[in-house]
Image: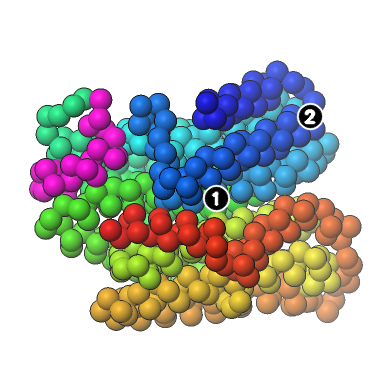
Amino acid sequence: MIINMIFVLFIGMILISSLLKNIKVISIINIVGTMLIGGCFISVVDSVYKYEHISFLNNFLYIDSLNVIQIFIIMSISIISLLYAHKYIAHETKEHIITIGKAKTFYILFDLFVMSMIIVAISNNIVAMWMGLEATTISTAFLIGFSKNKLSIEAAWKYIIICSLGIGIGLIGIILFIYSAGVTEASEIANWTYLVSKAGILDKDIAKIAFVFIFIGIGTKAGIAPMHTWLPISHSEAPSPISALMSGALLNLALYVIVRFYIIIKLVSGLENLKYLFIIFGCISLIVSSFSILRQTNYKRLLAFSSIENIGIMTLGFGFGGYIAIFGSLLHGVIHAFGKALLFLVSGNILSVYKTKRMDVVQNLIKTMPINSVFLILGMLIIVGAPPFASFLSEYKIMIGGIHNDYLIYAIIYAVCLLLVFIGFLKSFIKMIFEQDNSKIYTKSDMDKENILPIVIAFVLVVLTSVFFGGYLTEILDRATLIIES
């Protein structure tokens, strides 16, 4: 069975990373292994494309168009991040910044992180979803604290405490959700497909309370404000390939879990007003992030607050509802994932040259790192939703969806926040790229061409999604939209 092969590959990579001592060999095996897992999923996705959904292990695992999007994001960014980590870890080891043992630990934790996300993405059992999310907390906590300096350790502890509390609240919601279904077949009661089919018999009051717990609890993991307080320091202190994977894949995945439960809630008569959780918290996320971006002095924290903003955009779109806004949110999740991965990897290259995250110290990038500065500009345009990138289309669809469904005030808040974010990014990045101190001599860095391939791949994925938007991807997004909407 292909699912068995996928998990055998994951376990194999973990064992190889544990046993071998040659870091370059471990890195290459992880890259090839992850590509093979991606290849295995291609046949799974093809089956979903033909049959709309498939299940494994007596319906314990369930894959439809909605989680196909998550699988695509997770596997793509995992490969990109591993390609970046190949040179990143080799450099850190060569310079004796980290030991061989620590480098091995990086790959073991990376594999556990990706495997945990895949478990969340393909699980039909809602308890397994929760367990997968909790497993991502454990693996990423050690990756955030990888540098073992004061700030990274503080970030790791903050992440563990806040996200574990959130996941605990989410577990209460899941238990209440199962309880709301009443006494029924034990083998099916915790399956998402069963709860969807029996939405009409759920206890309305208990289901309502359960969803609030799930939204607040798992929303903490998604970085929805005001439960976002762990995110800026964690994404800032984590190694750049981990920041890319967390921002591009993990936040999306947590929001996906919330949406899975929202689909059930939409089928329960009388709970329509729960959509305002998405709308209000989406607006809070946009407001908090936009004003934070305007006053940022740390470029990695700026990108972290941008992640909160983009999660807010998607959350708001799901709250607006309707085909247009939901389609826009799903499309935005894909584009944001690749665009943010690109920016975090560029930030890693800048950090390796300038040895600081302070924006006022990073100057004249167009001279010192011309290749990276071009990708920094392109990444900014992707993230702020500038044409011709598909992020412009996704943000526009959410706006139109909000206006069409009579959420004019919230649509105005959305538009103002997007403008503030654009101003914040433009102000910060223009200074980093073009501003110079006339008393200094700037020379091109020899490291400008280092680790460019994964950045190029991330950009190509954005271009392919934007320029050739249509066909297979549009069909998957369309089906996923209909799963949520209908």
**Which residue sits at x=61%, y=40%?**
38
- The residue sitting at 55% across, 70% down in the picture is 390
Q: Is residue 214 visible?
A: yes
215 over 406 or under it: above or below = above
Residue farthest toward the front in the current orientation of the protein: 50
Amino acid found under the numbered disc labelled 1:
Ile
Q: Position of residue 303 (x, y in %)?
A: 57, 61
Q: Earlier in the sequence, mark 2 or mark 1?
A: 2
Amino acid type of the residue that numbered disc 2 sits on in the rendered structure: Val
Secondary structure mainly formed by the magenta segment: helix
* Mark in front: 2 vs 1: 1
Query: Which region of the structure is painted magenta?
Result: 187-209
> What residue do we see at 67% from left, 70% from top?
378
Q: Residue under circle 1?
A: 73
Q: Which residue is mark 2?
A: 25
> In the image shown, does 340 or 434 lie closer to the viewer?
340
| Residue 150 visible in rendering | no
Residue 164 in the image: x percent, y percent? 38, 38
Q: Nearer the viewer, residue 370 or 275?
A: 275
The quarter of the picture where residue 193 lies is top left
The reply to whether the magenta stretch includes residue 200 is yes
Quadrant in which residue 369 is drawn: bottom right
Q: State left or right for residue 196 relative to residue 59.
A: left
- Asked whether 113 falls inside the magenta stretch, the response is no
For label 1, the SS is helix
Closer-to-camera residue (400/365):
400
Which color mode does the image show? rainbow
How crowded pointer 2 is (Cα within 10 Å; few <14, some 14-19, many 20+) is rated as: some
Q: Position of residue 345 (x, y in %)?
A: 68, 54
Instruction: Identify which residue is drawn at 61% across, 76% down.
Output: 388
